[in-house]
Image: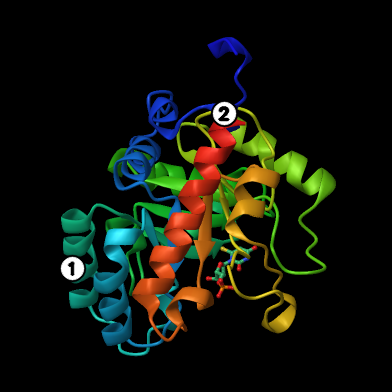
Amino acid sequence: MSNAQLTAKHIPYIQRAMRCANPSAKELFLIMEEKRSNLSVAIDVTTKEELLFLAKALAPHVCTIKTHIDMITNFDIHLLLELQDLSHKHRYLVIEDRKFADIGKTSKSQYEGGMYKISNWAHLVTAHSTPGPGVIEGLRKTGLQLGRGMVLLAEMSSQGSLATGQYTEATIQMAQQYSDFVIGFISQHRIVEEPYFIHMTPGVSLSENSGDFRQQYRTPEEAICRDGCDLIIVGSSIINAADPVAAAREHQQAGWEAYEKRLGS
Ligand code: S5P
């Protein structure tokens, strides 16, 4: 296949890094290649001690750590400083899964202010496209100058999600309009071919077939080879495992093998 004929899913992460205008997107592809990891761990816990314990233990195996910082009951600034230190030491990016979904002005204030000051520490944040391009414009105003990026929810893993069809199409158009800041999608499938857009996918597990509250799972191989996604987001199957490090290693290996198989296909 000549380079022109290659679709994004056949282009190595390292080459995709070179096509990224956004510095966090570039860094992410480089880290994935360097650590041989397309695994993001969703550390959905309720105390800073658990979050830091798992972040430290799992860091060598992941390219990103995804947080829900508003789940933490004893949040303080030291937690963020330690997460940042760890991210430099172990080379991972932090995604704060805030799922912004308000008008631009409000989302911007929520991003840079309040108790969490998310723009100060999260390399990447998630947002719904429901409000239209204003939510991107609001976050971009603060985030672009800090070298941050955002990920738009184009599809969801939960059964009965309304993010399908025309909604997904409109989300793609919004991302294309602001591709200096929107680095890709949370989706269940590959939905665009531009190689600089990354497809992050939750609802992945080597063990579970169905989750609580209509969460739906498939294996890393299905997510990467069959569905064409680039990065797997795994939460409970790692953090609730009897041995979270071993579970992270297994998911890392399965994700990487699927990626190599896809490149060769
Ligand atoms: O559609 C989605 C989008 C997201 S970001 N479905 C999801 O499950 N997520 C997040 O991925 C969710 O908030 C959680 O943090 C993680 C999945 O966790 P698990 O325990 O089901 O693997």
Q: Which residue is nearer to you in this view: 235 or 75?
A: 235
> Where does residue 190 sit, x and y in percent of width and height?
67, 41
User: Which mark identifies residue 81?
Assistant: 1
Q: Do the residues labelled 2 and 1 touch (CB within 8 Å)?
A: no
Number of residues whose C-alpha sits closer than 10 Å to that of mark 1, classed few (under 14), some (14–19) or many (20 or more):
few
Mark closer to the observer (2, 1): 2
For residue 11, above or below residue 39: above
The numbered mark at residue 17 is none
- Which corner quadrant of the figure contains ligand 1? bottom right
Task: Find numbered disc 2 in the image and state the secondary structure of the residue it sits on.
Answer: helix
Q: Position of residue 204 (x, y in %)?
A: 60, 64
Q: In 3D space, how far apart are the residues under numbered discs 2 and 1 (Cα atoms)? A: 37 Å
Give the side of residue 2 with respect to residue 18, left or right. Answer: right
Rendered residue at 34%/58% (across/down): 122
The way the protein has been coloured in the rendering is: rainbow
Q: What residue type is labelled 2?
A: His
Q: Name the residue under label 2.
A: 10
Q: Residue at x 43, y 79 (%)?
A: 239
Is residue 207 visible in the rendered image? The answer is yes
Q: Does the residue labelled 2 lie within 8 Å of ligand 1?
A: no
Q: How many marks?
A: 2
Q: In terms of image quadrants, where is residue 73?
A: bottom left
Where is residue 103 drawn, in percent x and y? 59, 56
Q: Looking at the rendering, in which quadrant would you find the N terminus?
A: top right
For residue 172, what is the image quadrant?
top right
Side of 163 relative to 240 (left or right):
right
Q: Which amino acid does label 1 sit on?
A: Leu
Q: Quadrant of the C terminus?
A: top right
Query: Mark 1: which secondary structure?
Result: helix
Most foreground residue, 24 or 89: 89
Q: Which residue is painted at 35% across and 39% down in the image?
A: 33
Q: Which sits earlier in the primary sequence, circle 2 or circle 1?
A: 2
